Amino acid sequence: MPARTVTTWTLEMTTRPELAATLPAGVRIDLAENITPEFARYLYAVVGGPWTWTDRLAWSREQWLEDLGVPGTETWVAYADGAPAGYVQIQPTKDDQHPASVEIRYFGLVEEAIGRGIGRALLEHGIASAWSLGERHDDLPATSRVWVHTCDLDGPAALPNYEKRGFTLTDESVDEMDYPDEPLGAWRSSGGPA
């Protein structure tokens, strides 16, 4: 894969926001309890295929199990008319500066769901779930910070959506990274032949 210049932004919120998005008719959000690596990889591929998400496509099943097995990791799936429309994965993180953080690891919609009012509601659900993670998991502290990375390989609405929900920019980096010249698309990312 060729090297590309990629701008990555880190955003955070340190105060629990008041959120008010409502789900469009025919849409629900469910916690994927005991999510399998196969379903997690499918969500990653169909949501990220149009936006050059390739980092995890070569992961082994064991790598998926390890990541999904981090205590407190949750995957919330939006369904529209019975089919997956998008997802948000949250995971606790900690370092010396932020011992009770939750990262929004992945968030996005399948192509067919874009523009239907699902993204705002799903992201707000993910934010609320990140802030309340310690309430559902006895072994986790109360959340004091929610954070996320996004980059210019993500959809054009990603950064503005995070900012509109109350995230503030804390870091920006520009790096040379190996990515395909064009997104693979959902079909190829999920294992379909070229």
Image (cartoon, grey):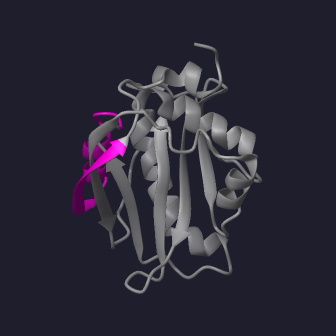
Is 186 above or below relative to 6? above
What residue is drawn where x is 57% and y is 13%? 194
| Image position, residue 21 (x, y; %) | 40, 45
Farthest residue in the front direction? Answer: 2
User: Could you say which is closer to the camera, residue 133 or residue 54?
Assistant: 54
Q: Quadrant of the N terminus?
A: top left
Q: Mark yes or no: residue 24 visible.
A: no
Report if residue 181 lies within the magenta region. no
What residue is drawn where x is 57% and y is 39%? 44
Q: Is residue 53 left or right of residue 57?
A: left
What residue is drawn where x is 36% and y is 33%? 2
User: Could you say which is closer to the camera, residue 110 or residue 68?
Assistant: 68
Q: Is residue 116 left or right of residue 75?
A: left
| Image position, residue 185 (x, y; %) | 49, 22
What residue is drawn where x is 34% and y is 49%? 150
Q: Mark yes or no: residue 12 visible.
A: yes
Residues shaded magenta: 154-177
- Quarter of the image holding residue 30? top right
Farthest residue in the bottom direction? Answer: 96
- Quarter of the image holding residue 141? bottom right
Farthest residue in the top direction? Answer: 194
User: Could you say which is closer to the camera, residue 118 or residue 24?
Assistant: 118
Q: How many marks?
A: 0
Q: Is residue 125 left or right of residue 155?
A: right
| Image position, residue 72 (x, y; %) | 64, 67
| Image position, residue 163 (x, y; %) | 25, 52
Report if residue 159 lies within the magenta region. yes
Is 83 above or below relative to 74? above
User: Could you say which is closer to the camera, residue 25 or residue 119?
Assistant: 119
